[in-house]
Amino acid sequence: MVWGSSFILMKHALIAFTAIQIGALRILFAAIFTLLFAYPNFKEFRRSDIIHLIIIAILGNSIPYILFPIAVNHIPTGIVGITNSMTPLFTLMVGLIAYGRKLKPLKIFGVGVGILGTLILINPFYDGSVIGENWPYMLLALTAAACYGISINSISKLNHLTPRAITLFAMIGASVPSLIILLVTDFTSKFNGDFEIWTPFLAIAFLGIVATSMAMVIFNKLISITTPIFAASTTYAIPIVAIGWGLVFGEDLLWNHFFGMTIILLGVWIVNKNSLN
């Protein structure tokens, strides 16, 4: 529910901030909040984990948190939410390519079904599509989902760390480039006495504290007690919630968007069938 609502909060935050500022500020809020309850977990740090932690910080947080706001600024929120449901498929493919996980024929079929659903969803050759010429921004959302897939596989390699520790180290790592981004942009000039700036600012604070820090701890725990792909399947609910919010706020969705979402979720279900490894 929280992740599905995140896209609406991103769109609201875009009223006052740029996409890159939203991503950077979201991470800083998450880092500060995580420090408040997870600072004792610093003792779990190991140098051997640095590579995986960098991957989680950059690909699991920094890049997606910038790409998704850019996407929702140009295409309907519900469609971005649908795209995010591709995360389990990317998790599977990364696990296969990078970590040599076994892949059954049924799962290959499921990946193909998911890709077909994405093509139906994007439908770049139909002039009447609500995406229209903005369909390349769908690729940014897909890239963000792919980044999540890589990050989730790295998280699964850190079972010796507590979920709090993983979240803490990832947020600290991601906060360094985020702080630099805010310093070199016109972020501080936004606060020029305009009272309307605070509502988008609070939306970002919610994204950082609830939809990033708290959600990541829960998600990391889920990965530690199940499998990467099963955990990634929590994205099932995201498109439904995102579409619901999109309709509430008057966004247009066409038949191919609902049909594409159905095909994508079918592909993800096939991939997850019979407890995936």
Image (cartoon, rainbow, N blue to C red):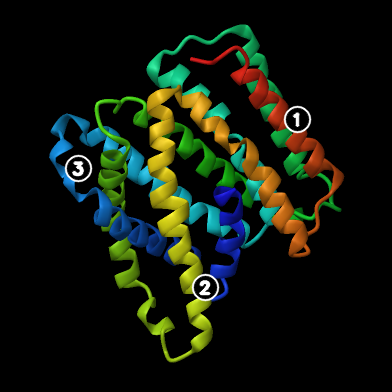
| Residue indicated by mark 2 | 200
Q: Secondary structure at mark 2?
A: helix
Q: Residue at x 41, y 44 (%)?
A: 216
Q: Nearer the viewer, residue 254 or 43?
A: 43
Whole-number angstrom distance, CA of label 3 to CA of label 1: 42 Å
Mark 1 vs mark 2: in front: 2
- Residue 122 % position (x, y): 73, 43
Tag 2: residue type? Pro
For residue 206, above or below residue 41? below
Q: Residue at x 66, y 23 (%)?
A: 269
Q: Residues within 10 Å of mark 1 (few under 14, many from 20)?
A: many
| Residue indicated by mark 3 | 41
- Residue 95 % position (x, y): 44, 21
- Residue 129 % position (x, y): 82, 51
Q: Are marks 2 and 3 in contact (CB under 8 Å)?
A: no
Whole-number angstrom distance, CA of label 1 to CA of label 2: 34 Å
Q: Secondary structure at mark 1?
A: helix
